[in-house]
Image: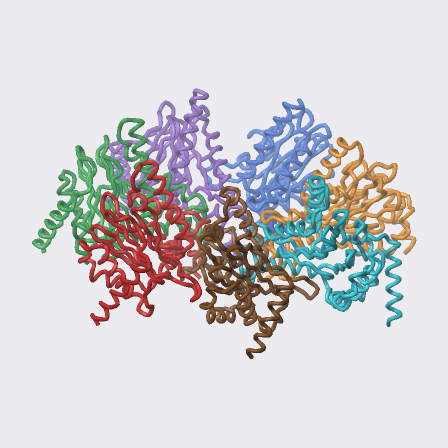
Chain colours: A brown, B cyan, C orange, D blue, E purple, F green, G red
Amino acid sequence: MLSVNYSLSCVTFDPKGKILQVEYAKEAVKQGSTSLGLKSNDFVVLVSLKKSPHDLASHQEKVFDIDDHMGIAIAGLTADARYLCKFMRSECLNYWYTHDSHHPTERLIGKIAKKAQIKTFHPAKRPFGVGLLVGSVDETGTHLFESCPSGNYYEYVAMAIGARSQSAKTYLEKNFEQFTTLSWQELVKHGLKALKASAQETELSEHNVSVGIVGKGLNFRLLNNDELRASIAEISDAMDVSE
Amino acid sequence: MLSVNYSLSCVTFDPKGKILQVEYAKEAVKQGSTSLGLKSNDFVVLVSLKKSPHDLASHQEKVFDIDDHMGIAIAGLTADARYLCKFMRSECLNYWYTHDSHHPTERLIGKIAKKAQIKTFHPAKRPFGVGLLVGSVDETGTHLFESCPSGNYYEYVAMAIGARSQSAKTYLEKNFEQFTTLSWQELVKHGLKALKASAQETELSEHNVSVGIVGKGLNFRLLNNDELRASIAEISDAMDVSE
Amino acid sequence: MLSVNYSLSCVTFDPKGKILQVEYAKEAVKQGSTSLGLKSNDFVVLVSLKKSPHDLASHQEKVFDIDDHMGIAIAGLTADARYLCKFMRSECLNYWYTHDSHHPTERLIGKIAKKAQIKTFHPAKRPFGVGLLVGSVDETGTHLFESCPSGNYYEYVAMAIGARSQSAKTYLEKNFEQFTTLSWQELVKHGLKALKASAQETELSEHNVSVGIVGKGLNFRLLNNDELRASIAEISDAMDVSE
Amino acid sequence: MLSVNYSLSCVTFDPKGKILQVEYAKEAVKQGSTSLGLKSNDFVVLVSLKKSPHDLASHQEKVFDIDDHMGIAIAGLTADARYLCKFMRSECLNYWYTHDSHHPTERLIGKIAKKAQIKTFHPAKRPFGVGLLVGSVDETGTHLFESCPSGNYYEYVAMAIGARSQSAKTYLEKNFEQFTTLSWQELVKHGLKALKASAQETELSEHNVSVGIVGKGLNFRLLNNDELRASIAEISDAMDVSE
Amino acid sequence: MLSVNYSLSCVTFDPKGKILQVEYAKEAVKQGSTSLGLKSNDFVVLVSLKKSPHDLASHQEKVFDIDDHMGIAIAGLTADARYLCKFMRSECLNYWYTHDSHHPTERLIGKIAKKAQIKTFHPAKRPFGVGLLVGSVDETGTHLFESCPSGNYYEYVAMAIGARSQSAKTYLEKNFEQFTTLSWQELVKHGLKALKASAQETELSEHNVSVGIVGKGLNFRLLNNDELRASIAEISDAMDVSE
Amino acid sequence: MLSVNYSLSCVTFDPKGKILQVEYAKEAVKQGSTSLGLKSNDFVVLVSLKKSPHDLASHQEKVFDIDDHMGIAIAGLTADARYLCKFMRSECLNYWYTHDSHHPTERLIGKIAKKAQIKTFHPAKRPFGVGLLVGSVDETGTHLFESCPSGNYYEYVAMAIGARSQSAKTYLEKNFEQFTTLSWQELVKHGLKALKASAQETELSEHNVSVGIVGKGLNFRLLNNDELRASIAEISDAMDVSE
Amino acid sequence: MLSVNYSLSCVTFDPKGKILQVEYAKEAVKQGSTSLGLKSNDFVVLVSLKKSPHDLASHQEKVFDIDDHMGIAIAGLTADARYLCKFMRSECLNYWYTHDSHHPTERLIGKIAKKAQIKTFHPAKRPFGVGLLVGSVDETGTHLFESCPSGNYYEYVAMAIGARSQSAKTYLEKNFEQFTTLSWQELVKHGLKALKASAQETELSEHNVSVGIVGKGLNFRLLNNDELRASIAEISDAMDVSE
């Protein structure tokens, strides 16, 4: 009975100083399918496992472009992600028109975090039920940020979020030190291997995987089906060999 | 006691990160009578089983035209569907006056999804208790979308929603690969067969079935009673033979 | 405990996807005294059993004129009905001044349904606790609609609502096929017989029965006491004979 | 537990389709001291038993004049009655200034009923806890209306409301047929006898009884103490004799 | 459990038709220290037992002047009384400037009652937790009114409110008939005797008693300490003798 | 269960006529550290025991100057006190600019009381959780007032509030009669002795004691550390001797 | 059950006069990682242990610059801290433009406290879940303040807040007396030693420690990695020796 009441509203702390609605919103992120990101000095790669509600459906996109220099991968409530995605795109556009340059990454992350924090401040709102991995390149180099329902954000060299992301994280922890100087093609392979680790029972294919890349001299774009198929085949061979 | 409290408001996550009111609204869709859609390269067909509250009543329409190039089939709360239907019609009209062309399908679906997502953001609102199958044809080809109470939407080649839609889905899964090049007449037959699968105890007739068609060079329209009677007769014969 | 909480507000679905407040408002309709309607190609007749709170009181009117071409019979909360009645009258009047013609029936029904649906969308409102049978004649012929607390509406050839309406419905189901070409006098007799079936213990009289008629070339009006007395006598004789 | 929750707000139906707050407001009327009204073709008489909170207090008035042609007797919350009384007086005044004639009775009753119905439509309001007997004379003759917390109203030839009003009603039922042609003096006597029936243990006197009269050619007025004393004496003698 | 829920808001009737919050506010009046009033044809006297939170504190005033012709004695929440007192003073002042005469007593009482009734009409308000005895003289003679949290008011010849007021009431009931022609000095003595009856264990003194007087040709004023001491001494002697 | 519900909102009376939230706010005052005041004909002295959250912290000020002629000592929530302190300062300033004289004490106390009473009138507010002792000198002499969360205020010759204030009150009760003609230096000694009585285990020092003085010809000021040290030493000697 | 209800809203006192939501917000501060501050006559040093959600993440900054003369270290909800940080920066900037000088420290602390107190005054808000240590130098010397969720603030010579801060406090209590004349380099060492005491199992490094310094003639700045590494090495050596 106790914990229930504390958890019903964002403007209520529980006796341990937690805002439970924020904790539960994080749970919504954990239920989303795996998304991950990793970066080298020159490139950032975002990789997501796409979900499909049914065999007859197309898969739901999980990686979105925000701007030439920025993209996101999501885990959690897609509808909330679309809301934030729209906000980010319009901020980047406005910035471009005003300053004639790309929106600095951390400042945009800060704006999202502020939006998220406000949601934890009003009784008539709920936290966003989605986590974002933001990959971008700007004057200060390549960046990989995670934005959380709590209004916190963190910078990473590589990170995985969503359901069963633990195996992906383990892979990334083991290998992140060698990422620094890799080409984007190599980063994509590591990303797919990490995703494979989390999604062992799901056969990866160009239909259920999304890969977004951005880097110095490389505008953000999603890999097309041919590129995806080739990359997946490559890592499958490699893994078969390694077994 | 626990799950009850979490379920009372849209702005409340439960400890598993679910917004239960959204789950329950989906249940309202599942209680609606069956609607289904299927498409070929050139045509989309929407088929619904119409409900009648009483033998003395006319059947309640389940397939609605939105525009020359678009129609919807619904499952769930009819009153909510009327609300969304009106919105879609007015959006299409506005688009036509502004751009002198049809409203691109996915953009309109996106607008509905945004409307639905907002309903999950305010404590004083409830999610829409209706699912839509949207069939349309635009410059990018034929489309079949499903829009959900959660603010999610999916693209399908064929899909069935509502009560006992499982049998219809099974039929569509078995046969969807041959739909690609069919004429709308053939699609209608497959649609009726799929509906028949879900509604075995109900005798299909021109009174309790609605069929909407749209395609390249074919404005959206509902089949009239004669066409319906003929098509139903045809599949009955075919099925009698096949038995 | 469970169902209670779900039922307290219109903006709350229960786990089965029902809005219980709407269900309970329908119950208010079922508690009202019987009203029924039936139609031929040229006429619509509305018949109600009027309630009286006490022997010393006059009976409360249950059939109301809306316009020359339209009337309603109600079951449920009279106070809510008056609210809707006033709305319909003013819509008809406005339409007349604007278009110089009668308000098309289904469009007006649509407006009421929208009003009712909105009541199921806000936490600070309650659904209307009344059901309406709307009889009208317009360019598309004679119409008999039922408008429900849920925001749904249905077209009928004959229908009965309110307490113990089952027997009336049974009578109408048995006989509706012969209504098509009847004069309004014959329709009135069938209506009174159907009402008699539902109100067996209550002696019908000009005091506790209301009958409204409308048709091609016949403005909506309520039968006066003499007409009522005569009609009731006629069916009583007929029924005595038939016994 | 169940019925409690349903009863807390006007915008909540219980599973039987009742708005319990309205039912409880009616109970407030039943707790008020007895008021009654009766009418002949030419006169209406309102009679109330006045309550006194203490022997040292004057009795609280229960019959109020609204206009030359109209008065009310109340049962229930006096404070709510004052609110409605003020509303009625100002409506009559406005009507007089606008139309130079008396406010038609039923139209004014309709306005009160609308006010009462709105109170049952908003969660932040409560129904009026008072019942009104309205006696008036206008172009359509003499009228006796009852207005209820539910927003319903009824026309009567004679009626009693409030605590222990059953005996008064029984008296009125037995005798109402002879009221039609009576003078107001005779009506007053019948009214006092009916009141006496309800208030057997209370000695009627000019201090605890109020009588209002209105009729054709007779502006509404309250009987003065001498008239009251005389009338009460008369019926006491009569009743002593009849015993 | 039942009565609790009904009692939480003013806009909630309990099943017996009571607004419990109003009942509880009356209880706040009953908890206040005794105030009483009594009147003759020419004078009104208000007497209060003043409370002191501590021996080191001055006693809290319970009798207040409103205007030349009017004063009040209170029982209940002093803070609420101050609010009403301020309202009454400003109404009297406005009336004086507008009409160049004293505010008629009952009309002012009516305004307070309306203010109190409104407090019982909104969920976000609470009834006033204070009872007022209003003593005044105007063109219609001397008046003693009680204004209640319910929005009711009563006129008295003599009345006592607050804690242990029963003994004072008993005294007043026994003696009120001889008050009619008394001088204000005699009324004061009766008032003090009645207060003494209620406050037997408390020694009356000029410090804990307030007496306000008003009458024909006598502006409202509080007795000063000397007058109080003298009057108290007089009744003490009298009572010693009578013992 | 009962008392809980009544206590949750200021706009709720409990069945005994109490507003429990006000009672609980008083409890917050009782939990504050001791503050006391005492006065002679010419001076008022305010004394507080200052709290420190930690040995490393400076002590939190408990005595504040409002104006040349007025200061306050507080017990309860410091944050609420700051709010009221700011209000009082600004009122005094405004008064000065408007009237070119000091704000009369009781009128300012009345304003605070009104502010406090309003807090007990709205469901969305809470009472102030702080008690004020206001010491001042104006044209009517020296004053010592206490302002409570309930909106009540009292005048005292000497008073102590806050935790363990009982012993201080006992000291003041025993000695207040000799205060009348004392110099402020003597009053300070009595004040410190009373504080000592309440804070027996705490060693008084210039760090944890605040003393404010105001009087005829003496603007309000806080004693400085030297004066405090001297005074404390003096009473310690005196008490050692007296033991 | 009891304490739960009282704790749900800031506008609710519990029976002991506590606002539990404020107590719980303080708990959020206690859950944050350790931050501490210490000062000499000329310098203030802020030291924080930075948290990292994961090995792959950068550490979250805990020390922020506000202005040339001021910085803060935080414990608790980072998102709330960012909100307050932004507020402080903008206040300092405004002050600078208006007065051409630094914002006086205590006045700014007062503004934050007011912001925090208001959060405890409205039902639709929650207290800030963060504690601030504010270090600054202004015309009145060096300052170290703590600002709490309750709206209270305290001045310290040295203080530690957050999880396991007890050991740091103990260290500071033992040594604070020698801080008065230290250089900032010496203060940093003491700060790191105190932090080490609280974070025994965590190896301090330039990655998980932040140190901010400000002083007379020294603008606020964060130590860079080299300085941090050097300082940490120094104290490690010292402590090894001391063991």
Res A27 visible: no
Res E98 visible: yes
Residue B8 vs residue B175, the one in the foreground: B175
Q: x, y percentage for residue E38?
A: 39, 34
Q: Reply above or below: D219 against E116.
A: above
**With A167 as the anchor, is F142 left or right in this view?**
left
Q: x, y percentage for residue G105?
A: 29, 45
The quadrant holding residue D84 is top right
Q: x, y percentage for residue A159?
A: 49, 64
Residue farthest left in this picture: F241
**With F202 as the anchor, is A210 left or right in this view?**
right
Residue farthest top in this picture: E100
The quadrant holding residue A72 is bottom right
For the N terminus of chain G, give its image quadrant: bottom left
Residue G62 vs residue D78, the one in the foreground: G62
Residue A133 vs residue D216, the one in the foreground: A133
Q: x, y percentage for residue F204?
A: 17, 53
Q: How many marks?
A: 0
For the C terminus of chain G, give its image quadrant: bottom left
Residue E45 vs residue A42, the one in the foreground: A42
**With G122 as the anchor, is G204 left or right in this view?**
left
